[in-house]
Image (cartoon, rainbow, N blue to C red):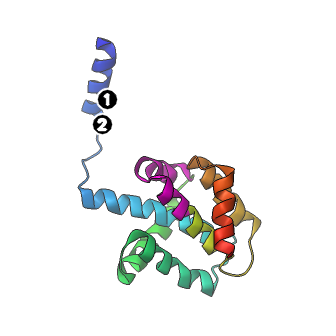
Amino acid sequence: MVEVFMLAKLKKLFSFEPTLTPEQQTHQLNLAAATLLIEVVNADDEISIEESELLPQLLQTSLNIDHNQALELIDEAKQTQRQSTSLFQFTEQVNANFNLQQKQQLLLAMWKLAYADGHLCQYEDQIIRRTADLLYLKHSELIQMRNQALS
């Protein structure tokens, strides 16, 4: 028991992560969600006009930010997405901070983006399904969100 306590103290001592303010934490979470949406947009190597118009709208409504903040977040998310190696770093943040309904809304936004240009690319589908798995969402929730996006 003492060893576990000491290990925890040592990890904390050698952790070089600065403490983030609530605003910085919110921004990091918004960035993670936006980056997941960018993954869908970039999946088919074509960014349609419909996708580029829908993305800021989805960010504004789901993250409660204004249009300019959405555009800035998109630019930052594009850069973050280019530097990322997996979806896990983003889904980990979402899992730690989103409730079930928020995760479902994120997945719904991903489906809406995937269908924005009128067809679903296999790579968009794969990213959404992988994200749903990483967010610990059930297959039935995945299908429910897809059906909502189609209606």
- In the drawing, does residue 37 fall left or right of residue 23? right
Q: Position of residue 150 (x, y in %)?
A: 69, 74
Q: Is residue 45 visible?
A: no
- Circles 2 and 1, Cβ within 8 Å, touching? The answer is yes
Q: Which mark is residue 11?
A: 1
Q: Position of residue 36 (x, y in %)?
A: 54, 62
Kindly report the distance in space between the C-alpha atoms of the residues bearing marks 2 and 1: 6 Å
Question: Which quadrant, please, contains the N terminus?
Answer: top left
Q: Position of residue 129 (x, y in %)?
A: 67, 56
The type of residue carrying mark 2 is: Ser
For the image, the number of numbered tags is 2
- In the drawing, does residue 31 fall left or right of residue 146? left
Image vertical order of residue 2 relative to residue 101, above or below: above
Q: Residue at x 60, y 80 (%)?
A: 51
Secondary element type, mark 1: helix
Q: Quadrant of residue 142?
A: bottom right
Q: Position of residue 59 (x, y in %)?
A: 45, 73
The type of residue carrying mark 1 is: Lys
Q: Quadrant of residue 148?
A: bottom right
Q: Residue at x 28, y 19 (%)?
A: 6
Q: Please tell me which residue lies in front, 93 or 97.
A: 97
Q: Residue at x 47, y 59 (%)?
A: 102
- The rendered magenta stretch, by its main secondary structure, is classed as helix
Q: Quadrant of residue 15?
A: top left
Q: Which residues are magenta?
A: 87-106
Q: Name the residue that disc number 2 marks.
A: 15
Image vertical order of residue 146 relative to residue 131, above or below: below
Q: Please tell me which residue lies in front, 92 or 16.
A: 92
Does the magenta portion include 92? yes
Q: Please tell me which residue lies in front, 146 or 124.
A: 146
Q: Residue at x 24, y 48 (%)?
A: 19
Dot 2 surroundings within 10 Å: few (below 14), some, or many (20 or more)?
Answer: few
